[in-house]
Amino acid sequence: MADAVVLGLGSMLGAGVFAAFAPAAAAAGAVGLVAGLVLAALIAYCNATSSARLAARYPESGGTYVYGRERLGEGWGNLAGWAFVTGKTASCAAMALAIGTYAAPGHARIAAAAAVAILTLVNLGGITRTARLTLVFVVITLTVLALVVGTGLAAGHGSVSRIADPAHLSPLGVLRAAGLLFFAFAGYARIATLGEEVRDPERTIPRAIPRALGIVLLVYAMTGLTALAVLGADRLARSDAPLAAVVAAAGAPALTGVVRAGAVIAVAGVLLALIAGIGRTALAMARRGDLPRPLAVVSPRHQVPARAELAVAAVVIALVSTADLGWAIGLSSCTVLVYYAIANASALTLPGARLVPAAGLAGCLVLAASVPWRSLAAGAVALSIGVIARAVRIRTASGSTPRRS
């Protein structure tokens, strides 16, 4: 149980807390950011509950890709898998850009591409995060966040009036902030997608996901309120490295280097695990023919889906070379929300309570449609490509099947 909770914490405590507050503040202001954080947490809770019920029924790798296929049909499973791969690839780009922004502000794209290349090579060598190594990353992350919160509160530069500032508050802004902040909560799927590697998954997964989510919400709330109190919504929205800006504004510029280094280590740890997770989902999809079958090859030496991970790395490097951080966060949130919408729809077919999955389904669809339009358009295009590719594959397969005379 403890290892599973640590795994969930290690997957969620990453780029979101270090980067997502800035675009959320730009979208909704101070009060809207706080409201958006609560709304994102509520939707994440619904998703976690639905995912936990489904994972207990289907404790195998693949997550909602498997649940959609089993409960709704192959087409919905394919859409879920495509949404997951698209969303998490965008997440990788966002995390890499966060690493670049904190590590090398003047050369963020170069540093981001280098980080992706290095971590992919580490994964290809068969070195993935164990629960013990994940615990190290979690401790580093929590230490950095405690430093930020402690410095911000102790210095006396914070103001409650900045948190309560109603400027830029609007219903659409709150929804947009919630959609962007959902990016910071989405990592709990890591537990479900690696269900085959969790001990006693029927018992462990339903307990571990909500516990990890509750801890993360508390950490995010303390960090976000501190950032708003010290910087205010406008300064927070303009900051490329928000948590480093908090300690600098709180009168401790000497600590910005520590915060930047801690952010790089924390986000790199999540990115390392995420590349492995996407590769495994792509492997499962390729084995079923929903992605090109050559991606289903597993390295005999290190037992990793080498081709799938290399393909993911290539796409991520292309994204970090052209996209900005806010766009990547929006694209990730949009497509991952579609993924969880399918999870909630799948949970609706299970016997038992229907209110939570119904609320999760509605919430996911509303938040997905509320992200900035550039991210929404990119998400729609990406998911359409997945649907069209499957239709072409099915038509080609049926056309090549010999007819009986």
Image (tube, rainbow, N blue to C red):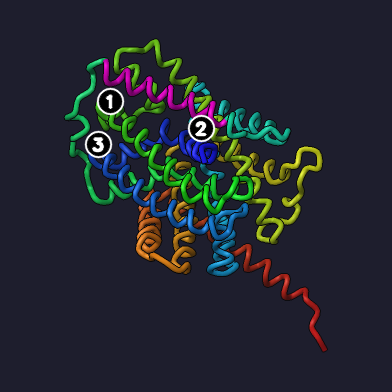
Left or right of residue 79: residue 231 = left
Q: Is residue 354 magenta?
A: no
Indicate which disc residue 30 carries: 3
Instruction: Write down the region rendered in magenta.
Output: 134-154
Q: For mark 3, does the 10 Å Cα neighbourhood hold few (<14), some (14 to 19), or many (20 or more) residues? A: many
Label drawn at residue 231: 1
Q: Residue 194, position in %: x, y?
A: 60, 47
Pick out the residue farthest to the bottom.
405
C-beta proximity under 8 Å, tags 2 and 3: no
Mark 2, residue position: 97
First of labels 2, 3 by sequence position: 3
Examine the structure image and report whether residue 150 is included in the region drawn in magenta. yes
Q: Earlier in the sequence, mark 2 or mark 1?
A: 2
Kindly identify the residue that appears in the image at 32 percent across and 42 percent down.
37
Alpha carbon separation for disc pair 2 and 3: 24 Å
- Depth check, mark 2 against mark 3: the one in front is 3
Residue 75 position, x and y percent, is 58, 67
Q: How far, Cα to Cα, is label 1 from label 3? A: 10 Å
**Tag 1: amino acid:** Leu
Q: Amino acid at mark 3?
A: Ala
